[in-house]
Amino acid sequence: MDNTDLEPRSEAETGRFEIEDAEEYSEYLLHSKAEIVAVLRSLIQRRALISAYLDQGSDFLLTSLLEVDTDDGELLLDWGRDETVNRQALQASQLILSATLDKVKVQFTLHQLAETLSDGRPAFRAALPNKVLRLQRREYFRLSTPIAKPVKFVTTIKRLDGSELIAEASLLDISGGGVGLMATPSLAALLPSGMALSDCKMTLPEEGLLVANLCVRNKFDVITRGGARYVRVGCEFLALPGARMSMVQRYITRVERERKARLSGMA
């Protein structure tokens, strides 16, 4: 496979892995060996490209599934062109693999790859995963908001001393599950994980004002190519009413349609 190489992790790829949040995504986890094998074989049949994130996700290896051996309880992964890259993958204690199959996100975790042969060619061998995540909810499609038409976010934060702060930020991304805020380090420091944010206001272009309650779920630092630093603050919608969820979905669908049209030269 020619494009199996290790690449620096892009900002778009940075974020949490749903399979690591078993409590929130438990209903999308498969534990049956038969179901797991069926999903893995589908990845082989569709020749799906898989991103294998090494250890804490600082780098990832593009690969694909070659074989699933149910008798030995193992699977085979494609081998890369760069020996240095392959050694890094072999030395990694854990890899989180993520792929998309018919618009369904598939994730699973592997431990300790080993070197082997497949049809006379080098390959990676690993034990079959004991669980696979199949995230097929449409609302969890995460859209990166357009730079040309940024979505502004405004909320009121109550400080420990009882005073209030009007906080403003831009959205990095949005889904039916929540939003990602582009926050300054000072603002992010006021948003601890688990904090509830009430009556947050976001103006979705051509849709209107979205008012929602959110809960801060995760934070991570991001450094842009230009060296600027900010914090992505991931927030989950809390009991978002159906009408407002429809507003979010309309916005996501329209922006994605416009983006695809531009890429195809139709707009």
Image: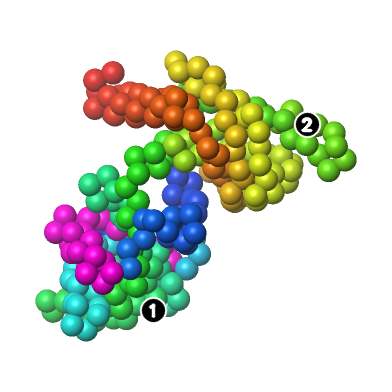
Crowd band around label 1 with a 10 angstrom C-alpha radius: few (<14), some (14–19), many (20+): some
* Nearer-the-camera pick, 62 or 22: 22
Q: Which residues are magenta?
A: 32-54
Which residue does the image show at 19% across and 72% down from the upper left? Answer: 68
Q: Is residue 240 visible?
A: yes
Q: Are circles 1 and 2 on residues that touch, CB within 8 Å?
A: no
Q: Amino acid at mark 2?
A: Leu
Spot occupied by residue 236 in the image (x, y as percentages of width and height): 54, 42
* Secondary structure found at label 2: strand
Residue 125 badge: none
| Picture quadrant where residue 213 is located | top right
Q: Does residue 240 lie above or below 223 as drawn?
A: above
Name the residue: 28% across, 69% down: 32
**Which secondary structure lies at badge 1?**
loop
Q: CA distance from mark 1 to mark 2?
A: 48 Å
Percent across and percent down for residue 170 are 58, 30
Q: Which x, y percent locates residue 69? A: 18, 77
Identify the residue under disc 2.
165
Q: Residue at x 18, y 59 (%)?
A: 42
Name which quarter of the figure residue 152 lies in: top right
Magenta stretch contains residue 114: no
Residue assigned mark 1: 112
In the depicted view, which residue is nearer to us: 14 or 210?
210
Number of disc labels? 2
Q: Is residue 11 left or right of residue 115?
A: right
Query: Residue at point 51% right, 34% down?
Result: 240
Callout 2: 10 Å neighbours few (<14), some, many (20+)?
Answer: few
